[in-house]
Amino acid sequence: MRNQAIAGLRSLVAALGLLAGVSLSAPPAQAQVLPKPLTDADFHDFDPKLAEIGRLLFYDPILSGNRNISCGTCHHHDLASGDGLALGVGEGGTGIGAKRTTGQGADLIEKRVPRNAPALFNLGARDISVLFHDGRLSVDDIFGNGFNSPAEEYLPLGLKGILAAQALFPLTSETEMAGNPEENKIAGAAYDRIDYVWPLLVERVRGIPAYLDLFRGADASIATAGDLGIVHIANALGDFMNSEWRSTDSAFDRSLAGDGSAMSPPARAGMELFFGKAGCVSCHSGPLLSDQGFHALALPHFGPGRTRRFDPYVRDVGRMAESDRLEDAYRFRTPMLRNVALTGPWGHNGAYATLEGIVRHHLDPIASLEAWTPDMVLLPADARFERVDFIALDDSRERARLKARVDIAPVMLSDAEVSQLVSFLNALTGSAKGRLGRPPAVPSGLPVD
């Protein structure tokens, strides 16, 4: 009788299609609480007029030092809001995605971007309080402006949220958008003080009548060109990103909302592993499938590294560079997973070109680090960099330090179970094209990537 009662209860839960928030196929002892579905209520509000202006600015090279790259170059609609590269090619490069080159002649880039360009899906969620791989931007009033950021007290007041604040920093980066100080005054200003960059960019936008007209139509406080400031530009970019890349309609989301047939049997089996035996949920938790925490995974070192000011090593110590705490060495922010199957290469430096590769690395980080080889990474060819790209990987002392800081224990899964886990990650794919899409042209008249 007891077994019949349990079977009846489980049939009822299955009929409700996960509304009870538990796994359907695992026995009661292994049942896992699933997150609630994502809805529009989980996101910050946005102004549609500002979002439209932000769409244009996002793809307008006018915001780069040499007017040759935009936010959209490395976060492109055709590339699921990323760039499809392990380490990006910023200011000076040409093309997008796998066809992007490191430039030519006087425009040759001086180094690769140190980290992978993260996808932008669901970054407008209310629960997000920290951004960037190392968390160097967070919601915090330590400097009296609402954020703890690289700009410290020089970050302007009036930003609508963390996405608007985030939009300001690629504009000041030499490798990403600003360029070399010898090439333009914007890059030179970044060397003086970070907030000296933004007024120079505002001057450019003020000089384009179409942008002024659009801003006047969206904000009654902007009457003249002098009323337009960097906060208006940042808020427009933030509202665009908030509204553009929302993904809440994957098979997994539909399943959470009650559609018991939304996921295939392999994906459902993978979900059981994700929330159970594989332990993925220990970091990828909550509705966003991220704890917003920082974890060390022993991903292999390569590229120029995001080195600290006094660091003699070509390496990237992750969160420690921001927190100054040794226990944070090599820890990086847990990414959210909606549309993860579309946003490779994977890892904070794009170390793995396949989704299965990054999954297997999580299952045994040390063994995967030892087995990793340079031919597994996608980097635009450049003989100047190929001689030094893997210096850190070849440093036995740095490898030992990397292996000594691992936050996850090995998990044994069969090949079939790995395949099921990958199937579940594919079931997290939903809307990816964006609400407004890439504009065909921008008010500056500059080319749109």
Image (spheres, rainbow, N blue to C red):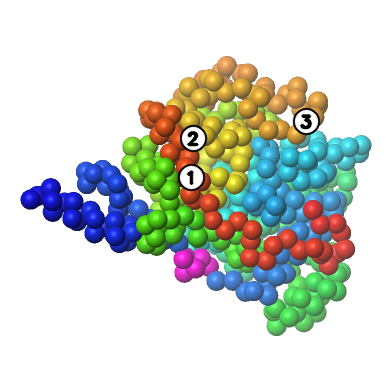
Percent x, y for residue 349?
Answer: 61, 36
Q: Is residue 196 above or below residue 410?
A: below
Above or below, comparing residue 36 to residue 304 in the picture: below
Mark 1 or mark 3, earlier in chain: 3
Image point (86%, 70%), residue name: 208
Q: Nearer the viewer, residue 432 or 217?
A: 432
Looking at the image, the residue that sits furthest to the left is 1
Would residue 387 be seen by someone viewing this image from the given angle? Answer: yes
Q: Which residue is mark 1?
A: 425
**Camera-nearest residue between 425 and 215:** 425
Question: Looking at numbered disc 3 in the image, what kind of residue is underneath it?
Answer: Ala
Q: Residue 357: x percent and y percent?
A: 54, 32
Amino acid type of the residue tagged 2 in the rendering: Val
Label 1: which secondary element = helix
Q: Which residue is mark 3?
A: 381
Q: Say what secondary structure mark 2 lies in.
A: helix
Q: Is residue 153 magenta?
A: no
Res. 143 image quadrant: bottom right
